[in-house]
Image (cartoon, rainbow, N blue to C red):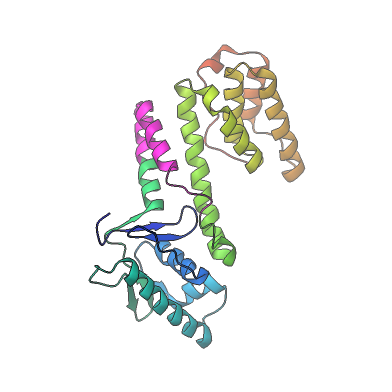
Amino acid sequence: MGSTDLEIGLLGPVRLVAALPERPLVSATQRALVAALALAGGRITSYGQLIWAVWQEDASNRRVHNLHFHMSKLRGQLRAIEPARPEPRIVTQPSGYRLDLAGSRADWQEFDRLTARARVLGRDGDLAAAGRLYQAALSQWRGPALADVAAMSSWLGAQAARLDEQRLMAFEEQAEVDLAVGRHREIVADLAWLAQQHGPRQRLTSLLMIALYRSGRQNEALAAYASYRAELAARFGLDPAAELKDLHRKILASDPCLATQTGVGPTSA
């Protein structure tokens, strides 16, 4: 990294790094403010929005004062992290604050860029390159999104859930690519673990069933379907979708088409 290059990390605990050794942001409030400002993508975030995002309260005079205090502290942290940067990262506007992202690298934006490119390559049939890009995209993650601030407010929790969902979708898309190039044995363990962690999710279950079946584990593929069906009924009172039922029938019949089928589409319960 150059002297004014800042790395902003939200795909895991919130972090700001411009030089090594890293200087962590000690205050949870400052980390939450970084997350809220960064997710605005360089746009102005009003005082009220920031206060709600961090404290889940309306913008009282006391909270506005607290906001200005923590922003002042955060500016000092950023100056220490980027001493060579001539302009402040946090820009004050009459209605709120803005985080200047120029000369920075944001992990969630890099993840979005890589997954978008991987999808294009996958549609074009370059599966090997698509798989590499999915791996690079998923390597941006250091843990659950906003791991150290997500519990501070419902807004931060919702943003974390949105980012985590994108991560899971990218993994499913990578698994589709892996199945298409014959890497079913390599991905069974990860698919099984994710299916256990995320409950009744149709696309994930279908990928697991196919990977197990192609690995010579037909009974386990049928058991995965039975487990999905039972949990779906218990939690939501629903039956599996027609596509998944069809996949189950094909596995029972050892249908030859399963040698090339990769999934049932991007739907999830």
Number of numbered tags placed on the structure image = 0
Horizontal and vertical percent position of residue 139: 43, 42
Principal SS element in the magenta part?
Answer: helix
Magenta residues, as a range?
Answer: 117-145
Residue 33 vertical position relative to residue 231 in the rendered view, above or below = below
Q: Which quadrant is the N terminus positioned in?
A: bottom left
Residue 144 vertical position relative to residue 134 in the rendered view, above or below = below
In this rendering, position of residue 85 left or right of residue 96: left
Horizontal and vertical percent position of residue 218: 66, 18
In this rendering, position of residue 8 left or right of residue 188: left
Residue at 40% x, 31% y: name it.
131
- Where residue 80 sits, quadrant-wise, is bottom left
Horizontal and vertical percent position of residue 192: 62, 32
Q: Is residue 119 rendered magenta in the image?
A: yes
- Where residue 104 sits, quadrant-wise, is bottom left
Q: Is residue 190 rendered magenta in the image?
A: no
Front-lying residue, 205 or 62: 62
Q: Which quadrant is the C terminus positioned in?
A: top right
- Where residue 106 sits, quadrant-wise, is bottom left
Residue 244 vertical position relative to residue 66 in the rendered view, above or below = above
